[in-house]
Image (cartoon, grey):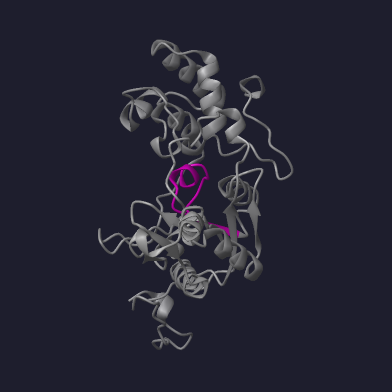
């Protein structure tokens, strides 16, 4: 048993258990800084329901027209998706409590993304293949959570950008909590990955320590690997192993940039292609007030 569970009189202290029945960590005076898009998304996804329609001959032409223009109409499912936001909110609160239990944080801030941010102007194909519908009630849930907890619904930037900025500038105040590798690899130190899956037996966990060098190299590696989820191509055929080897001898951003340009040109692409990709993947382009697009001329 850890000495943390002994009182000053060397007696066993009361041990608190978290929602999973595991020993809760010692409380820390930090705030859970949450990239909460996934938290809200999964809460809505797990609570929405599809109300199946009657045969079309049961409706008038006007009713059919109204059904087909309903934003929650799903032609493939032949139904209309609905959601009870109270249930979705409760599901989000359960996830939040799990995060607080397992990090030891006592307070939280939540950040959400809404609309088209600056990356869509960098590349009009950014996330272009995401044609599926969002879970019903997603924005409504984000608004409700934002009204309840400190944080922001971001439009010019993504929630990722502001979470990384705050985690970098105030590490003594925050524990960064996210599921996206783009964030988890961008900030030195330990962060908390709140992804979990009962189906695949995956639990929330602390990340391995990210070194300062790891964080410097991270966006350049991402520019090589690409990100299919965001429709970022990278270099065809190059994965994590190739990226690790490519930047193994680089200790500064300028060295990383030059190595990246060499790799792009060797693959038949240009320096401008590398620049565009870096402006899509780089997580340190928000300075707290404005976007400063990645510019290799400013590197040292």
Q: Is residue 252 visible?
A: no
Instruction: Report the residue at 47% width, 47% height from top.
Output: 184
Residue 28 in the image: state x and y as whole percent.
54, 69
Q: Which residues are magenta?
A: 174-191
Instruction: Report the residue at 60% width, 68% height from top.
Output: 144
Residue 98 in the image: state x and y as whole percent.
44, 70
Q: Is residue 183 magenta?
A: yes
Residue at the outermost right position? 289
User: In which quadrant of the rendered image does the N terminus lie?
Assistant: bottom left
Q: Is residue 24 magenta?
A: no
298, 71: nearer the viewer: 71
Task: Give the answer, above or below, for where 8 lies relative to 296.
Answer: below
Q: Is residue 41 visible?
A: yes
Q: How many marks?
A: 0
242, 120: nearer the viewer: 120
52, 265: nearer the viewer: 52
Residue 272 in the image: state x and y as whole percent.
55, 16
Instruction: Report the residue at 62% width, 40% height from top.
Output: 117
Task: Give the answer, above or below, for where 145 lies relative to 180.
Answer: below
Task: Give the answer, above or below, for where 84 lies relative to 126.
Answer: below
Residue 7 in the image: state x and y as whole percent.
46, 85
User: In which quadrant of the rendered image does the C terminus lie?
Assistant: top right
Which picture quadrant has residue 181?
Answer: top left
Residue at the outermost left position? 200
Instruction: Report the residue at 53% width, 45% height from top.
Output: 187
């Amino acid at each position: 048993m850890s000495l943390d569970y002994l009182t000053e009189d060397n007696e066993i202290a009361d041990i608190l258990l978290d929602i999973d029945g595991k020993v809760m960590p010692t409380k820390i005076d930090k705030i859970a800084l949450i990239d909460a898009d996934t938290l809200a998304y999964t809460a809505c996804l797990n609570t929405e329901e599809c109300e199946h329609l009657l045969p079309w001959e049961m409706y008038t032409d006007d009713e059919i027209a109204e059904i087909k223009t309903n934003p929650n109409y799903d032609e493939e499912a032949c139904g209309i998706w609905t959601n009870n936001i109270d249930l979705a909110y409760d599901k989000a609160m359960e996830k939040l409590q799990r995060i607080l239990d397992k990090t030891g944080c006592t307070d939280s801030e939540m950040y959400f993304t809404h609309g088209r941010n600056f990356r869509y102007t960098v590349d009009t194909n950014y996330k272009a293949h995401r044609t599926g519908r969002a879970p019903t009630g997603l924005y409504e849930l984000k608004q409700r959570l934002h009204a309840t907890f400190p944080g922001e619904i971001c439009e010019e930037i993504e929630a990722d950008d502001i979470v990384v900025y705050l985690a970098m500038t105030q590490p003594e105040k925050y524990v960064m909590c996210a599921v996206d590798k783009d964030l988890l690899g961008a900030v030195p130190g330990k962060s908390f990955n709140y992804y979990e899956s009962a189906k695949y037996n995956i639990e929330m966990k602390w990340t391995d320590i990210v070194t300062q060098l790891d964080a410097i190299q991270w966006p350049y590696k991402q520019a090589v690997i690409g990100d299919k989820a965001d429709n970022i191509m990278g270099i065809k055929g190059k994965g994590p192993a190739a990226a690790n080897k490519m930047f193994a001898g680089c200790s500064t951003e300028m060295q990383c940039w030059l190595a990246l340009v060499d790799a792009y040109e060797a693959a038949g692409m240009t320096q401008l292609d590398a620049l565009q990709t870096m402006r899509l993947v780089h997580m340190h382009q928000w300075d707290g007030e404005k976007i400063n697009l990645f510019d290799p001329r400013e590197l040292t």
